[in-house]
Amino acid sequence: MTSMVERWFGSWARKRKSQWEEYGLMGRAFCRDWLALISLLIILIFILGAIFAPHLTPYPEQGRGEPNIAEKLSPPSREHPLGTDRMGRDGLARILFGGRTSLSIGFLVVAFGIAIGMPLGALAGYFGGWVDMVIMRITDVFLSFPALLLAIAIAAALGPSFTNAMIAMAIVWWPWYTRIVRAQTLSLKERAFIEAARGIGVGNLTIITRHVLPNVTTPVLVQATIDVGAAILTGATMSFLGLGVQPPTPDWGKMVDVGRAYMLIAPWDATFPGLSIFLVALSMNLLGDGIRDVLDPHTRRLG
Amino acid sequence: MSAVLLSVEDLYVRFRTYAGLVHAVNGISFEIQKGEVFGLVGETGCGKSVTSLALLRLIPPPGEIEAKRINLGGDDLLSLDEAQMQRVRGKRIAMVFQDPTAGLNPVFSINDQITIIIRHHEGLRKGKAEDLAKETLAAVGLPSPAEIMKMYPHELSGGMQQRVMIAMALSSGAELLIADEPTTALDVTIQAQILTMLIKLRETHGLSILLITHNLGVVAQTCDRVGILYAGSLIEVGNTIDVFQHMKHPYTRAMLAAVPQAESRGQRLVDIPGSVPSGLNPLPGCAYHPRCPHVMDICQVEKPSLQVVGEGHTVACFLHIPSGDREAYN
Amino acid sequence: MKEPLVEVKGLTKHFEIRKGLFGRRSTVVQALDRVNLSIECGKTVGVVGESGCGKTTLGRCIMCLIPSTAGEIWVAGENVLALSAKELRDRRQHMQMVFQNPYSSLNPRLSVHNLVAEPLITHAKVRGEELTERVLELLQKVGMHEEHLYRYPHEFSGGQLQRIAVARALALNPKLLVLDEPTSALDVSVQASILNLLQELQEEANLTYLFISHDLSIVEYLSDHIAVMYLGRIVEIGSAEDIFTNPQHPYTEALLSSTPNVDPLKRKQPIVLEGNLPSPAAPPPGCYFHTRCPKAFDLCHQVEPQMIDLGSGHQAACHLLDEDKIAG
């Protein structure tokens, strides 16, 4: 009896141990990549800043949008480390609260894009034939519109709001992932292990989830990290046109657009939000590289 | 009595990698006579391709080549600078690879590719170069050379591409042809054609050939002499017939016993336990000792050098070194 | 068991290659042309030939990995080409395949455990502890160990990967194993260990093998019967003994003489075939081999030779064997 328990526990522990060894390897491989580490740090700082915004600034109401005209356009000082904007609102508070909007748009839009686009691309690439044709023709239709115009049109039709802006952008974004995943799937289909799975009698959908999707994540990841920055910017344009987030809710892109007018007299107004977008986009890119190297069991073991 | 064409002494090739120093080739020495087909045979990772690249000094950093001597027909190749070495490559020593598409540029016609080489090395005018090219294509057994000249590589079959590669090697008047697995990617009947042609070239053009392969059958049928490489060391060298008949080294014996043949139907093949060492942190002593059925204490400590066991036949194994002489190693 | 386990009748496979504007004009490549083959239970049939001969296509058609154009494939008393998709999926348990390149036939993202477990999960509905035990059993059967269980393919050598592939193929106790050049990518000594393993497994479980290879020496060593293919047709078939000692078809003779023998004392001038393989999209009329055959004569250009029975299962398709035709 004891030996059975031992055996059971032993093998469970062994399996967990191997898995944890693998995670450990992943962690160590990641930590060797200092660029990726720094990027992760930067992103985490922004994300945590956005989450805990009300507690990190003495001016939460200003962050949310309440004006403080008395101190409008003040340069950076001890009370206002990042200065104030044209309504006198604290710059740091605006950045923190703005992060909530901008980061959500960036990540959520890309997440939806992948969630819709990846399965469609895999289905199109794997099955070919009319499934491929139908999916790709729909994809082509979406791709043939200039992304921004399409997003604007959809958002305008749905009515100006944060959610509608996100829906509009997600609709515009998924076709790119379909294309990428389809191309990867087509080349993957030729690999013997897909044929081997069919020979075993594994069902098509299971082949797609078990064999195709895990092997197509790399280019998707690369595209996704670039897209986060692009999505933040597109969100900004939408807000600028009045279609997304409505003022006074802060949004980095909107802050840059509005602050442009004051570049000569109050450069901090546009610079800090702009810097935030830049840092997030760049860090996402570098982080993506790092994650990609870690996810591949082969490269994670290389020096 | 043929003269010695290529003489290599104590060749080492090492690579500095993140994981450490990889010893790809560990002090090998051999000679190739004029007009001889010398086979360099071994399994994956034994260092045979690296050796051929080292002869041509084509090993990029982080690889390092170190040798006591590499002589080609009396000239010391080690003392040549890069510019002089470039004149040797392709002209005096030519190389043919396993994948002919690697050596043939897909966007140039065969005519362009051969004549460029001829004109570079021989300095002939276009017309004369084309004539020489056609001659060489005929010498390698290609029918209608004039037609072939106009074609592009992808229009030719694998076998024909390989013949073109060999023609390109011949056209510059090379003394030594290094053929690295030239027929591994080809069908067996095409392989027979190419190998027969190579042997014939030895007679018509006085070509010496260094044939690198992992296929023992090919070696047995085409090579005059053979060197067996294991983990970067030459462990047996000699006449093909002597080596294959007498098989002095345990590894040679094991390799030959592992080859499936119709005659050995129903019997188990001999397989060698363990695997080829990686070249990283090589063990002391003989590289083969962890897998050798006749391993002795001294094998684990000292590395045997090549000893003469017959006419022109040398073996690196303590089994063939009289015990008295083994003391010299201590 | 006197009924053959596998019987292939008149198997034909065409590939269409679309060319021309709008894919209108298409070229048809004949990969297999009315192939007949039978494999007895517990035996090994070797299929040998060079590139373009159709041997790999034959394997894939029998495994139903690609659809066949015409013909019948009887496995254990059923015509697998006539089964419904659901029935076929169920029958797949009885025939498994080992592929040529172990580096690409195993999903690099799955652990060894999951790779070997896949057939069991798919068909036998085994889970958890029992699953791991069976996987371990299979791995041990092919000479691998417990510590390999949760590692990934890239950590292993070609020989080890091929063992894992064999373990996976044996998971469901198949009756037929199709081996498509399983040792071509491996070194000689590793190849020997895999061939030994295959022989042991065959003896233990009375497995039936279809062994596809371009290397005649391996096929002669391992097979009970050999089929020689050229451009989609079987040109000669017989016991390994017959093929080796008494080849009747000129192509078989050429193949035999071209295969380099490891004994340097047995050096001979190989029969060197003229020319190249004809394109499978435009095969020559009559006997496919006549363009390169050293013994071809008039009839060979015009009429396709039929398989001539030479006794005890030895057959060859060559006009030279038909006395009447030569005389007349």
Image (spheres, helix red, strand yellow):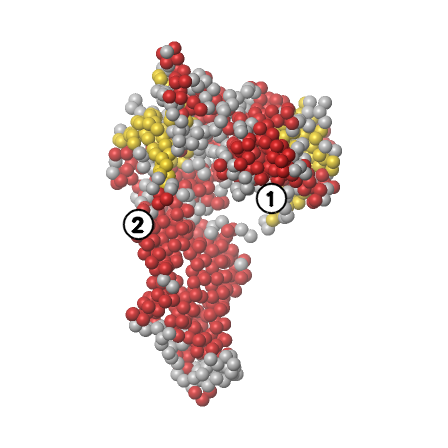
Q: Is residue C193 above or below residue A100?
A: above
**Alpha carbon of mark 1 to alpha carbon of mark 2: how far?**
51 Å
If the image is split into quadrants, where does the N terminus of chain B sit?
top right
Residue at 49% x, 49% y is: A298
Q: Quadrant of residue C121?
A: top left
Residue B219 appears in the picture as rendered: no
- Residue A173 coordinates in the image, percent (x, y): 37, 62
- Residue C165 coordinates in the image, percent (x, y): 42, 38
Residue A171 appears in the picture as rendered: yes
Q: Chain of mark 2?
A: A
Instruction: Using the image as rendered, state which of residue C295 and residue C136 is in the foreground.
Output: C295
Identify the residue under disc 2: A131
Identify the residue under disc 1: B280
Q: Is residue B41 above or below residue B264?
A: below
Label 1 sits on a secondary structure element that is: loop
Instruction: Using the image as rendered, state which of residue B117 and residue A36 is in the foreground.
Output: B117
Spot the residue most to the top. Answer: C327
The three-letter code of the residue at mark 1 reads: Leu
**How crowded is the residue under tag 1: few (<14 C-alpha within 10 Å), some, or many (20+)?**
some
Label 2 sits on a secondary structure element that is: helix
If the image is split into quadrants, where does the C terminus of chain B sit?
top right
Q: Is residue A216 above or below residue A271?
A: above
